[in-house]
Image (cartoon, rainbow, N blue to C red):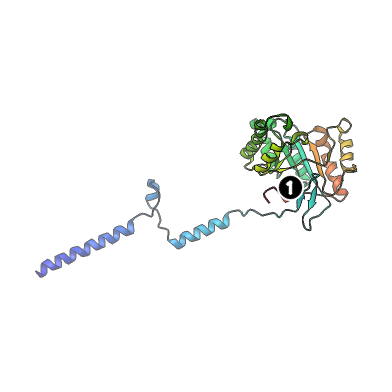
Amino acid sequence: MKKQFLYILVTLTLLVTACSKEQVELPAPGNDDDDTLSGSPVVTESAEEEIVQQQAEEQPVEKMIEPLYKLNAVWAFEPIGDANSKAVLLTIDDAPDKYALEMAKTLKELDAPAIFFVNGHFIDTEEEQAGLKEIYDLGFPIGNHTKTHANLKQISEQEQQEEIQMVSDTVEQVTGERPKFFRAPYGVNSDFSRAFVEEDGMLLMNWTYGYDWEKQYMDAAALADIMVNTELLRDGANLLMHDREWTAAALKDIVEGLRAKGYDLIDPATIKGVEE
């Protein structure tokens, strides 16, 4: 009887030891891949928390920029709070045709911010999209200027939507960011386009002055002179330029001329948007 009792006790001890050993050797929860289950280290809860915290600290923190300027009813910019009122915005339309990338590089060298408003028919090939991406990577926001530069009041609502949405979708696909600004060709908007643009999160923007489409200013020196010395230059002015050979040649003189008159250049990132 005593021997039978000892046999049962030894058997139970061996069973408990085997079960304990099996529990220790169980793999940590994971997927079903063989390489995950074989030799996977057991991560404790505290160690897991440390890993999560470390990963969070390594993630880049997006810098929030307070709006400094708001667009008014005459398409000029008013300062918010203590922002410098003596400032103007540079914009380039009909990009990226032939000179936009060159213009972006010039502006980058001058540390001069601007918005590049693009047309869909200039970003429908891989080469053109690569140029667009390079402009964006240089630090310039991309605005929507419609697909074919159509007069929005002369086409149907469905066509208007296609003109606008195609550009926003393509820009987002190429750059990873949807346009925040919209400018209608010829400055002509419809009730539908205004509503659709706002719904898509874009700030509708025209301009206060520009000259580079007029024959007498299709010359770099003449264009630089009028852009800097026009009577229309005032605080908050919204300057319209285009992807043109003579504009590209005049750009450096325009930027330096504006600064010589004491004007700062508005960073588009500081413009109050429709969602704010």
The residue lying at 86 percent from left, 51 percent from top is: 262
Q: Residue furthest bottom?
A: 2
Task: Looking at the picture, tell me which residue is in the foreground, 35 or 179.
Answer: 179
Give the residue number, with chain letter if any, for mark 1.
268
Q: Answer with left or right where residue 88 lies relative to residue 32.
A: right
Q: Position of residue 75 (x, y in %)?
A: 79, 44
Q: Position of residue 176 (x, y in %)?
A: 62, 42
Q: Position of residue 266 (x, y in %)?
A: 78, 49
Task: Looking at the picture, tell me which residue is in the foreground, 172 or 195.
Answer: 195
Q: Answer with left or right where residue 192 lies relative to residue 79.
A: left
The residue lying at 29 percent from left, 61 percent from top is: 20
Please, is residue 40 above or below residue 13 in the view? above
Badge 1 marks a residue whose secondary structure is helix
Within-10-Å neighbours for mark 1: few <14, some 14–19, many 20+: many
Q: Quadrant of residue 12?
A: bottom left
Task: Looking at the picture, tell me which residue is in the foreground, 237 or 212.
Answer: 237
